Amino acid sequence: MAKILRCGDLMPGCNAVVEGKDVAEVMAKAAEHAKKDHGVTTIPPELAAKAQAAIRDK
């Protein structure tokens, strides 16, 4: 089942929505979004855990 992450759940005010076929794909796309749009060069383990917990079924 496809997965979805709404960036605004982690970064208030961001309207980006990341979709993928599984958690791994969503996490990879979310990391790219965080680098490109939020200037997060390294994803700390706490943020990665929060992002993974915020991923939902589409």
Image (cartoon, grey):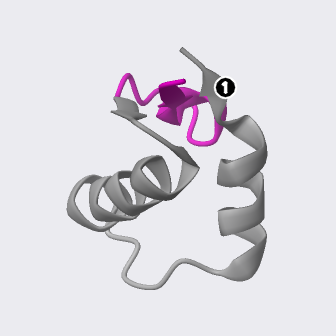
Q: Amino acid at mark 1?
A: Arg
* Residue density around tag 1, few if under 14, some if 14–19, many if 20 or more, within 10 Å: some
Q: Is residue 26 left or right of residue 1?
A: left
Q: Quadrant of the N terminus?
A: top right
Q: Is residue 5 left or right of residue 31?
A: right
Residue 45 on the magenta span: no
Residue 9 is covered by the magenta coloring: yes
Vertical relation: 16 (above or below) 50 = above
In percent of width and height, residue 33 lies at 30, 53
Closer to the camera in the image, 17 or 8: 17
Relative image position of residue 58 (x, y in whole percent): 53, 14
Which residue is drawn at the image coordinates 56% and 41% (left, top)? 11
Residue designated by label 1 = 56
Residue at 50 percent of width and 58 percent of height: 24
How many numbered marks are there?
1
Q: Quadrant of residue 17?
A: top left
Which residue range is magenta in the image?
1-16
